[in-house]
Every structure is written in C-alpha cells, then in structure tokens.
Amino acid sequence: MRLFSTNNPEKYVDFGEAILRSLPADNGLYMPENIPVLGDGFWKDWKSLDFQEMAYRVVSCMLQGAVPESELSKIVKEAINFPAPVIRLDNSCHVLELFHGPTLAFKDFGARFMARIMAWLSRDSEGTLTVLVATSGDTGGAVADAFHNVPGTRVIILYPTGKVSGLQEKQLTALGGNITALEIDGSFDDCQRMVKAAFLNEETSKACNLTSANSINIARLIPQMLYYFEAARQFEKPPVFVIPSGNFGNLTALLLATRMGLNIDHMIAATNINDIVPQYLSSSKYEPRPSIPTLSNAMDVGAPSNFARMKEIFGGEWHAMKESISGFAYNDEATCAAIKEVYEKFDYVIDPHGAVAYLAAQAWLTEHPEDNTVILETAHPAKFPDTIIEQLGKDILETPKRLARLAEEEKVSILMRAEDEALTSWLQDHPS
C-alpha cells in the first residue's frame, strides 16, 4: 500500500511511514494511491458475518498486504471489541450509537486500532514514540486510554482551556503514567495549528519521534469506515447518513467506504455555527475562520483538516461534492430544543452533537420523507451532564462507572500559551 500527499501527488511513501510520520513535510495529508473495491465475495457474505470478521475483511482489503494477515486479524479483533448498535426512533430516523467503547466516544474505534497498528510498526524501534494530539473533547480521552502505559510510547495531549466538559477534561488529565496534558490558553484551532507546526519543525519532529493520533493520520480514518458498513447492512434500502462534523474525519471515512463499494443514498454534514463546509457546499467558497465555542464542543473547528482529503476524493470538483453531500448548520438554541424534542418524542437522551445531526435529519426528511436517515451519536450524553440536566430539567442519566470514577480523580495539566513556539520549546526540553 502506497500513499501520497495531497500537496504532492507525485511523491509516495509506504504505509508504515505514513502512519508513523502522520503528516507529510509539505503540510499536506496522506491519501491512498488507490482505494481498492471490495469484491463480490465480500458482498455475498457481508450481512451474515459478525462485526469483527466483517471489519477485518474491509481493513484487509484497504491495506492491501501492508500488515501480515495474521497480525491484522488480531489487531482488528482486539481493537473492535464492542458493538455499534442502530437504535430506531421511528420509521425514518435511526441512531447509530458509537459510544460503547471504553471512553464512551466514537474515537475509541480509531484510537484503539491506531495504538495497535503503531505498536506493531514500531516493534523493533529502540526509541520512544511520542504521540502528539490536539483535542476539542473526545479524541484526547480515547487516545489517552488506548495508549495508556503502552511500552515505548508517550502521549502529549493539547486541549483548549475551559472548552471541554468537566468529565472530558478528567479523561485527558487524570490518567498519569505516559500521558501528559497541555492546557492551551486558546481554541481547538490553536491546538491543531501548534501540533502541525511541531510536525513541520524537522528538528523537533525527529528529536521527539513524533506521530499524530488526530484524524490527520490516515490510520484514524480506516477503522472509522467500519461502523458505516455495520449500520448500512441493517437496511434493505441504502440509508442517508447524517454526520455531526467538526474536523470532518468521520465524513471522510464514509467517503472512503463508498469508494470501496458501500452503497448509500446520501450523506449529510451537520455542523454547529462553525459552518465552514456547509457554506462551501452552498457557495463554492471555502473560507476558514476562527472557531466559536458552542455546546457541541467537539465540532468547534474553524479550519477542518480533512477538507483537503474531501477535495482530493472529489478531484477538486465542487459540483461533485455538492451532489453527494448536503450541509446543514444549527446554533445552540436549536441544539437545546432538539435535545428536549428527542427526549419528549422518543424517550431517548441524545448528546449535543447528535442533537445537531437530528435537526439536519429532520430537515432532510421534510423533503425526502421516504428515506431512512441514520444519525451518528458520537458520544455518550453522560459526558455533558450540565447541558442534559439544564435542558431536561432533571438528572435522568446514570453515569457509566468507567466515567463516574474519574470525577474524583485529580486533574493534572500544564498550562501553555497558544503559540507554536511554546510547544516546540517544551518538546525540545522534554524529548522523551
């Protein structure tokens, strides 16, 4: 399997270099040289396979022998050891629950797979692998859990101060061991920019043996394809996937899945007021801007990294992207109303990100009432207790034990200015 940079399609690297380096030196993003199509044998059996076996076959096809099959089978089955159930709200609206992993967020799919792939790729390395990651909420927790005390690795998490929920913050800051949390006095966009700058600083990147666990790393997107296959096979008619979107890794993973042959009806990008991609789909103008904090904090992204991959997949053709993807955006007031509506109509508690997707699904169904929509519920609502209690007027959620136990843990973080030099200087002072 070879991959190229979106900024230089003439230069290729192998799978291992793309995963362990994460970001090309030219500041592009790695993309597969070709996206293989699943054969007839897969489609003949795919609805009868268990989730793990189906997942292994999809990943095996994508990686094209980059990892020995016996190792890959073990990696996939260890990483994807929890379900992704589809819950019916009514005949037209369904919820794909992606919060049944250890940190109660969809990021567990990517982080657990990535940790095992990186461990295998660096199995003969004598140095320490530094996993550098920016988070607006759930990514950091999932990565911290997946890599916690993994030999030969350390994790450095950047997160914006005051812009993640209390329980999300504890997932980043309370594990200790090989996990270090840097609390950035700025936004998620600042965190993401600082991470990229560290990678592009050749001296720092080499000295610290940097790799990334953000969705800039293609290893995050490969396992995120899998739950689309799992959901789609439960419908006779190809569904419409409604994706709460920030950095657009989830939507890009669906695009990869469709290029492998997954048949869907349509895809919807649902954002909060950080609506850069919906605006692009409407006007053909891509205009990144500073992000604005919202209740759906994981979507507070003003310059989505994966937009470069989206453009690459569509060959830069705006009309082609617009035909495949519809964009909707909603503010916090609408999000709060949706949380109430979903509970009152369906007796279902939905988190703020899923609520944004629910609004987009309802807008779509107004014009397409015969479609089956599938909302991605990307995080357990218990991660947002203040918002849920405020909107529903009572605490109706039982916080899962693995989340509740963090509440009493001590937060340990290092405050840092939102400046590229602050991070590179810190990394140079702490090379391992």
Image: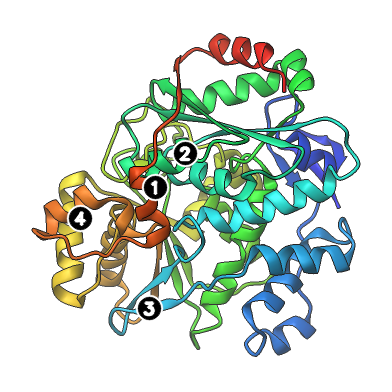
Give the quarter of the image for residue 4. Answer: top right
Mark 1–mark 4 Cα distance, whole angstroms, equals 19 Å
Say which residue appears at 39% left-offset and 47% top-offset: 406
2 or 3: tag closer to the N-terminus: 3
Asked which secondary structure carries label 1, the reply is: helix
Q: Identify the residue under disc 2.
A: 172
Query: Can residue 61 be seen from the camera position used here?
Result: no
1 or 4: tag closer to the N-terminus: 4
Which of the pair 374/311 is nearer the observer? 374
Q: Amino acid at mark 3?
A: Ile
Of circles 2 and 3, the one toward us is: 2
- Do tag 4 and tag 3 residues touch (Cβ < 8 Å)? no
Q: Identify the residue under disc 3.
A: 87
Mark 2–mark 3 Cα distance, whole angstroms, equals 29 Å
4 or 3: tag closer to the N-terminus: 3
Q: Amino acid at mark 1?
A: Leu
Within-10-Å neighbours for mark 4: few <14, some 14–19, many 20+: many
